[in-house]
Image (cartoon, rainbow, N blue to C red):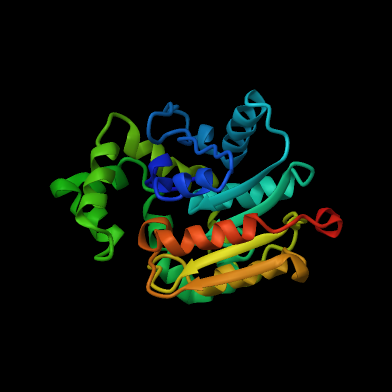
Amino acid sequence: MHGFPDSSKLWERQVPSLVEAGWRVVAPDLRGFGKSSRPREEAAYRLSEMQADVVAILDALGVHEFDLVGHDWGSALAWRMAGALPHRVRRLVAVSVGHPGAAWGAGGSAQRARSWYFLFFQYRGAAETLLAASNFKLFRDFLGDGCPQAQADRYISELSQPGALTAGLNYYRANFQLERFAATEPARSMAPIRCPVLGIWGSKDFGVLEKQMTASTEYVPAHMWRYARIEGAGHWVPYDAPDELNRLLLGFLSQPMHPVSRL
């Protein structure tokens, strides 16, 4: 499951590797992105709605138990699904983004400084106008120097479609709570995770600090938690380190499931 401003194309280097190893892979365009629909209502982009979409797809395919791999908002969605559907989620791989309950409190003021865009994206209409101005200059600045030109151009081409930019920003508007931005402690009331988890983070991530990933241990039993730091990779690990990511995915997903892991 991808995040902003991606589509299922994010996984174009991972899907062939997983399929070749014998896995059945489902990589949808989440609503608002790629070839998916773009509802106008802001509430349509809540993670609860995304979860219903993904579960409906899997049910239609006859898939009851499954492993989840998410990046960015797709990671946030994967964490949610692992907590809400412990009887169906076998393993979870969270790329770049740790458990939502740990992100703000663990990162402190440094994380909030990196996450300035969460506030900026709340300005409905104004954010769209400013991001798109001067051939999406501010959006290109948001992506950072580490984003290849071709990748940025593809994002801009997709976000230039009618309603696409607003749909993407609605993820932040529908799922972000201002009080969590100022949090100083993990949100301990959130559901614990009861499946094996692999957290993956790139050392050059511009938006999220390492602490928000490693603090996910607050929500995962110690014997079920694995962590991999990829040196030199930025936020878009699937693009920056595809071979290393594939190695990690295949190694983790191929581990046998022990009964204790489902308790």
Q: Residue at x 62, y 65 (%)?
A: 102
Q: Is residue 172 visible?
A: yes
Q: Is residue 171 above or below residue 241?
A: above
Residue 101 location, quadrant = bottom right
Q: Quadrant of the C terminus?
A: bottom right
Residue 241 horizontal/vertical position (percent): 40, 63
Please tell me whether residue 232 is drawn above or below residue 64 in the rendered image.
below
Residue 5: image x %, image y %?
Answer: 37, 46
Residue 55 versus residue 252 in the image, above or below: above
Query: Quadrant of the rendered structure where residue 242 is?
Result: bottom left
Which residue lies at the image location 50% right of the left edge and 39% below the top edge?
27
Can residue 179 be seen by looking at this rendering?
Answer: no
**Residue lying at 37% horizontally and 73% vertically, measured from the top left:** 232
Q: Residue at x 64, y 54 (%)?
A: 92
Residue 118 vs residue 134: left or right? Answer: right
Asked whether, in this view, residue 136 is left or right of residue 24, the answer is: left
